[in-house]
Structure formats: C-alpha cells, structure tokens
C-alpha cells in the first residue's frame, strides 16, 4: 500500500483492496475524508487506466502554459531545442522583467514529471534564471512550440512491468512512517 499526501489531498493505492478499504475507514474515522473513486486527476497530472497500464500526462497543464504565452496557434517544431545552441554564450539584451521567464521555466520544470524528453532543454533554460536574455526567452518559446505540436504526450506505467516501490522512512511532525508500514509516535 502506498499513500501520497499533498496538503489535504491524498492518493491511496495498493495491491490489497481489502487493506486499502480498511485504511480508508481508518482515515475517515480520524479525519472525515471523501473518497472520490479511481484516480483521474491529481496536481495537474491526468491519469488514464486501461489494460496496458497507467498513462500519466499533463496535457491540460501544457496547453495552459502555451496559451498563457500566446502561442496556442504557433507553428509547432519537431525538437524542443536547437542542437547547437549557444545559449551559454549569449550576450544579447537582458529581459527588462525576468519574472515571466522565471515563471515559465518553473512551470516547465513541473511539466518534466511526465515529459522527460524536456529535461535537457529545461535544464539548460533554468541556468539563466538570474539574468535571462531575450535569446533565452526565445529558446523557452521554442519549447512551447514543441509542446503545441504534441501536448498529450506522457508516461505509460505498464501493467506487465515488475515495477516496485521501495519504501523509505518518512518523518512528518512527531510521527515516523517505517518501511514496514508501522506508525511510530514520538512523544
């Protein structure tokens, strides 16, 4: 069983349905929870389940970013970044207000959760957060034009894969969740 907690949102999953049901009853007794059924959307991540497995994507989020930057109708590109870019050597004009660039790159960083092919491009763009130049913003807009061409790409977690979650010790306040699923209360 695995429990993902973000502020007041929870995702509970596991192979033992009875154990999950018992845990939901326990949580409801402690906190009065509302069971929304099978996971479909969580923190901007869309979840689709079929016989092949779980498909995770952020299409809505990607399109929001593209639209916010006014590039929804822009011509798509095949690759998110030029292969021989010289962004590290850029000497052009600094952006007068770097806030939009920083926000855009921050949103792109979150998008890499389900779009690992963007990791290199976003890594490069994130190096210029302190003093972004116009050429850096143009490179970021190229990533958006790439997204515009395929906003629904994502990650398939295959059902025939032997994927295992390895537990770790997690401390929340005075409570420690142990790998065996035991709860230790520290007074």
Image: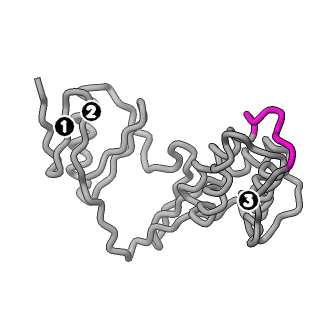
Which stretch appears magenta? 92-100
Q: Position of residue 173 (x, y in %)?
A: 25, 28
- What residue is shown with label 2? 172
Q: Which mark is residue 110?
A: none
- What is the CA distance from the residue labelled 2 to the residue labelled 3? 37 Å
Residue closest to the eye, 62 or 15: 62
Q: Residue at x 58, y 56 (%)?
A: 112
Residue closest to the eye, 11 or 18: 11
- 157 vs 177, left or right, is right
Residue closest to the eye, 121 or 170: 121
Q: Residue at x 56, y 63 (%)?
A: 116
| Quadrant of the image containing the C terminus | top left
Residue 29 falls inside the magenta stretch: no
Q: Position of residue 110 (x, y in %)?
A: 57, 48
Q: Secondary structure at mark 2?
A: strand
Q: Secondary structure at mark 3?
A: helix
- Extreme residue in the bottom direction: 160
Q: Residue at x 79, y 54 (%)?
A: 90
- 13 vs 57, left or right, is left
- What is the CA distance from the residue labelled 1 to the residue labelled 2? 6 Å
Q: Main secondary structure of the magenta part?
A: loop
- What residue is shown with label 1? 176
Residue 40, relative to residue 185: is it above or below? below
Q: Which mark is residue 147?
A: 3
Q: Residues within 10 Å of mark 3 (few under 14, many from 20)?
A: many
Q: Position of residue 161 (x, y in %)?
A: 37, 75
């Amino acid at each position: 069983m695995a429990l993902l907690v973000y502020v007041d949102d929870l995702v509970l999953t596991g192979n033992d349905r009875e154990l999950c049901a018992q845990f939901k009853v326990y949580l409801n007794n402690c906190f009065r929870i509302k069971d929304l059924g099978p996971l479909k959307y969580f923190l901007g991540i869309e979840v689709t389940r079929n016989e092949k497995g779980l498909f995770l994507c952020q299409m809505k989020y990607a399109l929001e970013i593209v639209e916010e930057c006014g590039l929804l109708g822009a011509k798509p590109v095949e690759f998110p970044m030029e292969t021989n870019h010289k962004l590290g050597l850029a000497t052009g004009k600094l952006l007068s207000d770097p806030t939009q660039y920083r926000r855009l790159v921050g949103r792109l960083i979150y998008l890499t959760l389900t779009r690992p092919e963007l990791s290199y491009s976003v890594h490069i763009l994130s190096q210029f957060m302190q003093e972004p130049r116009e050429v850096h913003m143009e490179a970021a807009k190229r990533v958006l034009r790439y997204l515009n061409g395929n906003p629904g790409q994502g990650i398939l977690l295959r059902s025939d894969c032997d994927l295992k979650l390895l537990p770790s010790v997690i401390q929340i306040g005075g409570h420690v969740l142990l790998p065996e699923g035991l709860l230790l209360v520290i007074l």
